[in-house]
Structure formats: C-alpha cells, structure tokens
C-alpha cells in the first residue's frame, strides 16, 4: 500500500537521522524566517545512495519529518504552558491519515466524542473512541482514563440511518452482557447454552461460583465478538472483544494461566486492529501479542511439543500460531524492525503452506457426511491423509461425548453435595460412598445423616445406622415432586387437599403411607407438616416471577444464538485474509 511504503521510507530515514544525530528542528535545517527546511546536497545525496532512492523523494520525506518534529515540539510546549493536549485520531475505515485534535484532559469522554462529531461527522453517526485498548467512557475525565498528550486514539463510526443495523454497537455490547449475566446464573447448563470452562486438556475446571460467572461472561462476550468478526462487522467485533478483554483482566492470573481463552481474545483484538488498518497506531498491540505468545507457549510448548503429547498432532492449533506470527511480523514492520519482520513473515508463510488443504481431499471427506469445518480441521490435523482425517473426526466426537458425560456426572454430584450439606468436619459428603449406602437399601436421609456424623467413613456409617435405627425415619433430602394426580388420589379418600399434599410430602410421595397415617389420625396431621408445603404452594401461586425469569432466559438465548456451539470453532480459520496480508507485507519488504 502507498501509505505503508511512505511510512517505511520515513522509518528508514528516521533511523539514519538518529544514527547520524541529525536534528531537523534545529539549525542549520530549520531557520526562523524560512517556511521550508534547508537540506544540504551532501546530506541528501548520502541518504539517496544509502536507501537507493531519488534525491527528490529524500528531500520530500525530510521535510515531512521536520514538520512533524516541529508540530510535536509545539504541542509539547503548549501542553506544558496551558495544559491543552494534542491527541492523534485515526478514523477506522475512513482515512489512513491521523488527525490532530487539541483538547484539555479535564474534558470527559462525552465531550471528546461531541467535539469529534462536530468537526468530522454528522449528528446521525454513532462514535466510539478507543485509547490503549479501552473504550473511552462518557462519564469520566480523559486524564483518568489514561489519555495523555500525544496519545493515539481510534475512532469507530456507525451511521444510525443504515436500515440493516437495529441497534448501535454499544447497545449490542450491553445486550450481550445482560444475556451472559442471565445465563451464567443458570445452574444446569443445557445444550442451548453450554460454555465449558476447561483447561487446555479439555478437563473441566471446578471454580467458585462468582469466578465461574465472571469467566462465563468474558467468554460469552468473546464468542459474540468472534461471531461479529465472521460477519465482517469489524467495528462491532472490536467493541465486544475489548469488553471481553476487560472482563478477563478482572480474573485471577492463575485462572487465566489455566485456560487459553485470554490469549485468543488478545489475538482476536489485534487481528481486528489489522483489519481496521490501525495496528501501527495502537501501543497495546505489542502487549497483547506478547501475552498471547506467552500463553501459547505455556499451553502448547515452545515448539508445540506439549500439544503433540496431548492431542497427537499440531495441525489445527498451528493456524493460531500462523496468525500470531503474521501479526507479529506486521507489528515489527511498523516498528522498523525489518529483519525481525522478514523472519516472522517467512515463519508465517511456512506455516500457511503446511495448513493449506487440498480441495479434492476436502470434498472426499465432506462426501462422507462431515461438515466443511470438520473436514478442514481434520485434514490439517492429519497432514492431508483422508483416512486418518475421517478416523480423527470419529475419535474426536467420541471424546467430546465422553467429556460431556463426565462433566454432567460431576455437575450432578456437585449439586447433590450442595443439597446434602457438609459433614461434621466441614467436608463435602462423598457422593460415591453415599450412593453405596443407597444401593444397600438405606433411605437417602438416613445415609446422608450417617455420613455427616462419621465424616464419610462407610464402615462407621454402617455401624451408626445399625446402632441408631431412628435415623431411618429421617426425611429424604431429595423429595419426590408432589403432583396434582397424587394429591387427588389421597384427597379422594375424604381428606383435604392441603393435608393430603402435606402427608404425601412427609412420606416422600408414598400415597399408601399418607393414606394410612390420615386414616389413623382422623385426617389430621402435625402443623409442621403443613408449614413444610405452604411456602411451596405460595411460590407456585406467584408464578409471575418464575415466568418472568423464563422469559428473560429465552431472550438471553436468542441474543447469543449466533454463537457457535462447536468448541473447536476458534481453530477453523479460512486463512484467506491472512494470505492476502502476507503477500502485501512481503511486497512492502520486497521479498
């Protein structure tokens, strides 16, 4: 691209000037009464020969660098004297040239947006300003949000009048956040909404409730951002990804080190920067890529060796490394680290060649009924071998089924542990031992109480149950739901509906025992039996709240229904855009 070539020339010439300690803003290059700089022929000829360029190009670039240096110096002096800062704006998707804006850092984010809108946009356009990887908030001063004199900011713009856009991007972020928060409170993960929090081996992580919810919120925002990326809504994707990045940053470091989701967010954010042609203007791109690289090395090893041990191959994950190395190369190019950029581009190109999938082989796998994503991932994983790819898909599906079964079983046990309560020493009841007692014929309530008293010892629990038969009359902790049909069966014998329900509840749904008790006691029951069922009755009568909760959950499901349910979806990169950027920067580096 022309702008990139100009930037490359500036960086090369800037390097020469720094090396030779040439200060263009001072004499003899800048004189007080001269509008243009003065450049000795000897200096111009020297740099023209060194950089293999025409003298006219050298003079033009020297003047551009001199003017830029004078502007920076003037802005610094003005800031020191008046407190008025000069920030550089880059309009994403509109223009490549940066725009200088003078503003007091005591202004709020809202005031900054209004100034930008008044000068460069119309009232019908929604603006978001991003600085150092964070969306500038309306309600806080710029200084409090890390904006400084000389800061570089990206401006995202969206026109309200576009009919295909129902909400502005910030509303989408807000709705996604609300949906994720609603769904993170659902105790039973369903097939409709299943965000698995697992380590790199696929093993589920058992986290405290609040930390699990925080991670689920961050992961949902990330997946929603990835969905927007697929739809080429880069501005909307960036807002969602930055929101996810913000949520991940609130999690403990040891949790983030156990999962690779944060690394993927960092990678996707910088990929968005590149797609919006802003990677060279955002200082946090380097930090994010470093965090991503460190996480990948922890997860997969320096040369993917850990991945080979875990999954038996490196094909699918190699696509992530290809994108990482490409982004690092682009960043190195804009930092004038040209040797490093060439090395990284060569590495990315080699990885791209390895990842290329033969179209005929892709068709062969798809003819067997597999999706294009399954076919592409498996062929990459198996080095293009069709038979191995088909076997890989089958084995992978079986592994996923097993993992889901194990996770469901673990969740069932966790819920049961919470319901049964702790043992005498504060430990959780051992569900395996508890269910051993049930298989021996002991009631649930008795088994739970015995294990609580003896801290999960099976032998001691058996002794307690033998020595204390009164434990056998303890109510079960997991009562059978009492249906209208069950109540009718008892009340038809002449008892009131409330007493019938209370007796059924006490005898855990046994109609025979309920009827026998009511017959023996003239239809009367203890008052505490009634109090046990009255709260449940009032709850069922006030079904509005429950119905509202269901409605909110339904709306939340609809809000995130574009999120892929395939846990390997993040690996299915087409690599078309990556190949285009690779060729573009190879051309710039004349490779």
Image (cartoon, rainbow, N blue to C red):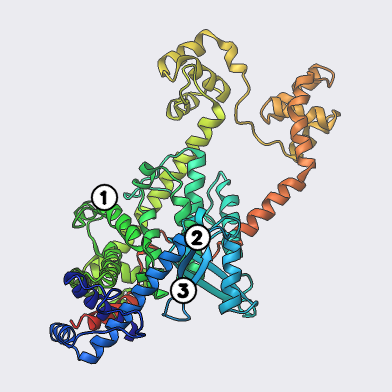
Please state, as top left, top right, bottom left or bottom right, where the C terminus lies in the image: bottom left
Q: Earlier in the sequence, mark 2 or mark 1?
A: 2
Residue 40 % position (x, y): 20, 85
Between residues 28 and 352, which one lies in front from this camera angle? Answer: 28
Residue 163 % position (x, y): 64, 80
Question: In this rendering, would 526 be left or right of 213?
Answer: right
Q: Is residue 56 above or below residue 442?
A: below
| Helix, strand or loop for disc 3 | strand
| Helix, strand or loop for disc 2 | loop
Residue 188 % position (x, y): 55, 45
Residue 402 visible to an observer of this rendering: yes
Please state, as top left, top right, bottom left or bottom right, where the N terminus lies in the image: bottom left
Q: Nearer the viewer, mark 3 or mark 2?
A: 2
Q: Is residue 202 above or below residue 428?
A: below
Between residues 378 and 484, which one lies in front from this camera angle? Answer: 378
Quarter residue 300 falls in = bottom left
Q: Residue at x 51, y 23 (%)?
A: 422
Residue closest to the far front: 33
Q: Is residue 476 above or below residue 110?
A: above
Between residues 570 and 424, which one lies in front from this camera angle? Answer: 570
Packing grade of label 1 (10 A; few <14, some 14-19, many >=20) is: some
Q: Residue at x 76, y 32 (%)?
A: 535
| Helix, strand or loop for disc 1 | helix
**Mark number, residue 100:** 3
Packing grade of label 2 (10 A; few <14, some 14-19, many >=20) is: some
Q: Residue at x 43, y 39 (%)?
A: 206
What residue is pinned by disc 2? 83
Question: In this rendering, would 291 be left or right of 17?
Answer: right
């Amino acid at each position: 691209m022309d702008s990139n070539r100009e930037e490359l020339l500036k960086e090369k010439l800037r390097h020469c000037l720094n090396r030779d300690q040439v200060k263009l803003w001072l004499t003899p290059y800048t004189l007080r009464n001269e509008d243009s700089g003065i450049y000795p022929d000897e200096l111009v000829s020297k740099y023209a020969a060194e950089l293999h360029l025409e003298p006219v190009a050298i003079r033009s670039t020297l003047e551009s660098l001199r003017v830029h240096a004078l502007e920076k110096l003037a802005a610094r002096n003005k800031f020191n004297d008046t407190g008025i800062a000069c920030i550089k704006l880059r309009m994403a998707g509109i223009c490549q040239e940066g725009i200088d804006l003078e503003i007091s850092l005591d202004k709020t984010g809202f005031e900054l947006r209004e100034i930008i809108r008044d000068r460069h946009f119309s009232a019908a356009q929604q603006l978001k300003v991003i600085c150092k990887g964070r969306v500038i908030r309306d309600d806080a001063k710029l200084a409090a949000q890390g904006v400084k004199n000389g800061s570089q900011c990206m401006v995202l713009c969206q026109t309200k009048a576009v009919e295909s856009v129902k909400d502005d991007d910030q509303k989408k972020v807000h709705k996604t956040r609300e949906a994720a928060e609603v769904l993170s409170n659902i105790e039973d993960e369903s097939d409709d909404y299943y965000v698995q929090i697992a380590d790199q081996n696929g093993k589920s992580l058992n986290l405290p409730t609040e930390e699990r919810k925080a991670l689920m919120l961050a992961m949902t925002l990330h997946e929603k951002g990835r969905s927007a990326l697929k739809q080429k809504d880069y501005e909307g994707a960036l807002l969602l990804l930055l929101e996810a990045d913000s949520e991940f940053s609130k999690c403990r470091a040891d949790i983030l080190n156990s999962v690779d989701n944060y690394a993927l967010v960092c990678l996707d954010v910088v990929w968005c920067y590149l797609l919006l042609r802003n990677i060279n203007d955002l200082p946090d791109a380097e930090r994010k890529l470093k965090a991503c690289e460190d996480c990948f090395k922890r997860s997969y090893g320096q040369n993917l060796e850990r991945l080979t041990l875990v999954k038996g191959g490196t094909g699918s994950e190699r696509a992530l490394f290809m994108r990482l190395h490409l982004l690092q190369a682009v960043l190195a190019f804009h930092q004038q680290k040209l040797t490093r950029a060439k090395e990284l581009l060569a590495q990315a190109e080699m990885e791209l060649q390895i990842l290329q999938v033969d179209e005929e082989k892709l068709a062969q796998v798809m003819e067997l009924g597999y999706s294009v994503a399954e076919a592409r991932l498996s062929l990459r994983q198996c080095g293009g071998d069709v038979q191995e790819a088909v076997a890989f898909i089958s084995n992978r599906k079986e592994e996923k089924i097993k993992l889901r079964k194990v996770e469901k079983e673990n969740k069932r046990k966790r819920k049961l542990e919470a319901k049964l309560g702790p043992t005498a020493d504060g430990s959780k009841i051992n569900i395996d031992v508890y269910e051993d007692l049930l298989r021996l014929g002991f009631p649930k309530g008795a088994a739970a109480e015995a294990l609580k008293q003896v801290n999960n010892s099976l032998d001691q629990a058996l002794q307690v149950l033998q020595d204390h038969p009164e434990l056998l009359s303890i109510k079960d902790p997991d009562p059978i739901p009492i249906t209208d049909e069950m109540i009718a069966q008892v009340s038809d014998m002449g008892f009131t509906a409330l007493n019938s329900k209370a007796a059924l509840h006490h005898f855990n749904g046994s109609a025979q025992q309920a009827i026998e008790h009511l017959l023996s006691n003239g239809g009367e029951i203890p008052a505490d039996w009634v109090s046990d069922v009255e709260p449940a009755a009032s709850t069922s009568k006030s079904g509005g709240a429950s119905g509202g909760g269901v409605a909110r959950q339904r709306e939340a499901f609809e809000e995130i229904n574009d999120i892929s349910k395939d846990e390997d979806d993040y690996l299915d990169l087409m690599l078309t855009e990556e190949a285009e950027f690779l060729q573009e920067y190879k051309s710039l580096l004349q490779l």
